[in-house]
Amino acid sequence: MSKFWGASVIEIKDMISYKFEVFIWGILNPIMLGVYYYLWHSIYTFSGQTSIRGFTFGELISYYALTLIVSVITWTNVDQLLAGKVRDGTLVNNLLRPLHVFTYHLYKKIGGTAFTFVGQALPLVVISILFINLRITSLPNLLLFIISVVLAMLLTFAFSFLVGLSSFWLIKYAGVRMIRSGTVWFLGGNIVPLAFFPEAWQKISNFLPFQYMSYSPIQIFLGRYDLYGSLWVIAAQLIWLVILFVLVFSGWKVALKQFSAVGQ
Amino acid sequence: MKFWRIWKGWFKLNLSSEMAYRLNFLLKAVAFATFDFFGPIVALVIYNVSQGLPGWSFEEFLLLQGTFIFSTGLVHLFFWGFSGKVIDGVRNGNYDIELVKPVNPLLLALATGSDIDGLPRSAVGASIVTFALIKLGWAFSVVHLLAYGSLIVAAVLFLLSLQIIIASLAFLFVKSYTMLNIFDVLTDVGKNPITVFGPLGTAILTFAFPIGLAAFYPSAAILGRLSVLQVGEVIGVAVAFFAFSVLLWQFGIRKYASVGG
């Protein structure tokens, strides 16, 4: 437990020294929400539709607000950090610590998320409640949503770390990182809800981990799944988590053999 | 001339350094191209599930998306690295070295700001624009094409002005990396027809923060929806914004303390 607190507090202290960078997103996220609001308001008004693929305008804006809130919680740059350390050889410092690199960064991520939640997500929650009528559909949905978001955070983190392992073979990692973040962002339903995509696409999505990183937890919050459906989402998240954890830890052993500690 | 000579030299250097890591370059090119296709895919989704945006057919909206990618891709190609380099120099306190060189510091910074990653982006943007125009059955018009070209140049000038403003703020506040995030978010507003933001929003995005230049106005021009006067007005706004950014740069550089931060 002390290791967890130690790593988390380091991250929080780090973030406090860059508080402007953290808090500015408290302003930028509402601006992004405003853009979605006007864009979709225009589309709904012009089309004269009260509902698009089961989403009323209010539900869709709530969806985007939740997307931004969830992304504050799930966002991670662990792959970039790992790649940087592999590249300059400083990973060796982490290897000497009595904590696995994955676990160390996960603890830091949790600490960092606590801070960014206050600085970035909370303003968005308040604005969403006041201006776009974001409401809790039911207490069980809220509880299941919280569990699902925590799992989504772990999933995103594990996936990013797994992709970051490729930096042991690649000298420059920027390209892979872009592909990773773009894939998670797009296939996670952050730009447009997956329900708007063709059915075939949605079926394929069910077999990929990305929808469980953002889209599915939000669907739970919005009450679009019944209890069974919500529990199935959480079960799927757990299954993916086990798969990714196995891949991360077995991949780590292979990747570490490539590491020379002298940098690249 | 001197500017372009330095720019060319820097571009070659940038290119050879990227070619040293070909796989990374290829992956980045694929990533940029994929990212840039998200806009058109979203357009396809929007028009598939609804009637789309008022005043913009699917092909027209595609043209707008392509134009946005094209103009931002050009800025990326020509000047993208500029503000980051200035911020780095100011933050580390070693920007002095740029000041003693026998070239205007702003021109030198701009000339060494090219980024090869902008090339696939511009190419994707140009392809989408061409595809959309073919789909629209666009009747070739030199006037409309000239208006489009002029407005693209104005768009690049405006986006460059934003970069200059961000770099200038580094002289005043030292840590202005966050401004790059602000730049990204505000620039993204330009992906949409600015008329969706209502009359006040349209006025703001035309005159106060003319991000409408990034896609809306060039697209409207090539579709023949702007008069010559309107084109001139919008170009005037871009020039005014550029002049403001240069003034801010000159003010900022006088405040440069050389101590880092």
Image: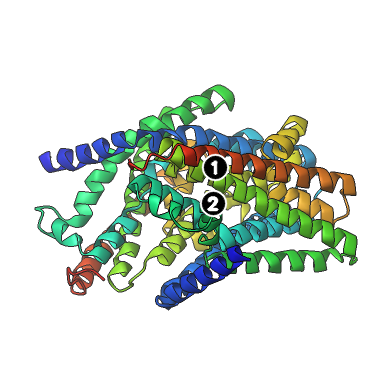
In this view of the protein, which residue sits in the foreground, A129 or B4? B4
Helix, strand or loop at disc 2? Answer: helix
Q: Position of residue B236 (x, y in %)?
A: 77, 44
Q: Let me know if residue B80 appears in the view.
A: no
- Residue type indicated by callout 1: Trp
**Chain containing the residue with disc 1:** B
The structure residue drawn at horizontal position 66% and vertical position 64%, both measured from the top left corner, is: B125
From the viewer's side, name the closer residue of B74 and A2.
B74
In the image, B205 versus A3, the foreground residue is B205
Position above or below: A202 against B8 = above
Q: Nearer the viewer, residue A172 or B161?
A: B161
Q: Secondary structure at mark 1?
A: helix
Which three-letter amino acid code belongs to the residue tagged 2? Leu
Q: Which mark is residue B106?
A: 2
Residue B200, percent from left and from top: 74, 30
Tag 1 residue: B249
Left or right of B209 on screen, residue A213: left
Q: Are marks 2 and 1 in contact (CB under 8 Å)?
A: yes
Q: Where does the image place residue B239, in percent across and percent down from the top left?
A: 71, 45
**Quadrant location of the C terminus of chain A?**
bottom left
At x 83%, y 47%, the residue is B232
Instruction: State left or right for residue B236 relative to residue A33.
Output: right
